[in-house]
Amino acid sequence: MNLKVIFNPFEKIAGTKSLFFGLAAVLVTGTIGYFSKTHFDGILNIHSGMQLAWYVHVAAPILSVAVIAIWFWLFVVIFGKQNVRVIDVVGTQFFAFIPLVPASVLGFFEVTVVVAEALQKFGANPAGALDIAASQMLVFVVLMIILMLLTVWSAIWIYKGYKVAANLPNHIHIPVYITGIIVGMIVPKLLIPLII
Amino acid sequence: MGLPVSCPSCNAPLRVSILKCESCQTKVEGSFDLPILAALSPDVQAFIIGFVKKSGSLKKMAKEMSLSYPTVRNRLDEVIELLNKNEPSKDA
């Protein structure tokens, strides 16, 4: 496997196959997230300490990916070529979720809860001391760095998948991607309460 | 040896200046355009030949090239753009 495939697998995979692997990844992530209390409630959004019904843990990332795929497809319909297939746009976006699978174990690390609570207390009373052991802080920072890298990796795949599948004119590629990420972060948060 | 399509010195497109009959040795001199397909790079020519051989099936092309369908479709779009760009104007 060369470096190019790690950052852009969509030269090799798209369509139904990518949709299948992407959905499987969402299913695995949602199920692990249910046990670890890790919730994916928007594109590139990960929260721990949220115990919801199993189907919500699975449906939330599906909804998030569907929102961004619909956003990209809208622009394909307006500006794209007629030979673009919807299955490629949807499939690549689901596949781009795969780098986030390891992030579903985040909630299993007790330190995330401890540090989050300590930071909340500190936020409410900045005069007080931050009650976190150095070792806990170190583990927390390492976890956050790993999480950030996984998120960036997924963001790259979202872009590459969309670029290959949608084949939009160059001048609208970046604006559609950026607005898509923003829409994919906000809209699922409004829709998820409707399915809980 | 493949047909050179661009100048090795300045990279400008080449034109045909002499055609020769191997049977009677007659030579025709002038300044002729290369056929539109001959003017394309060997990679693009191979892609077009492959596409025609696969009866124009992008799915079959993708499978043979071990590439995804949209990647092959995008490559075809680039070839179409290239052909449109290189096509001599109908007014000429």
Image (spheres, coloured by chain):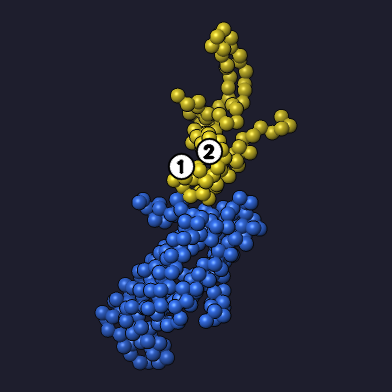
Chain colours: A blue, B yellow
Looking at the image, how many numbered discs can be counted on the residues?
2
Question: Which amino acid does the dot numbered 1 rest on?
Answer: Glu
Measured along the vertical axis of the image, is residue B59 above or below residue A35?
above
| Callout 2–callout 1 Cβ contact below 8 Å | yes
Left or right, A105 with respect to B21, comes to: left
Circle 2: element type: loop
Question: Which amino acid does the dot numbered 2 rest on?
Answer: Lys
Q: Front-most of A122 and B24?
A: B24
List x then y, in percent, for residue B60.
50, 43
List x then y, in percent, for residue A11.
46, 50
Task: Name the residue: 48% across, 77% down.
Answer: A56
Q: Is residue A94 visible?
A: yes
Name, please, the residue furthest toward the right.
B91
Q: Front-most of A169 and A99?
A: A99
Q: Which residue is mark 2?
A: B54
Measured along the vertical axis of the image, is residue A87 above or below residue A123?
above
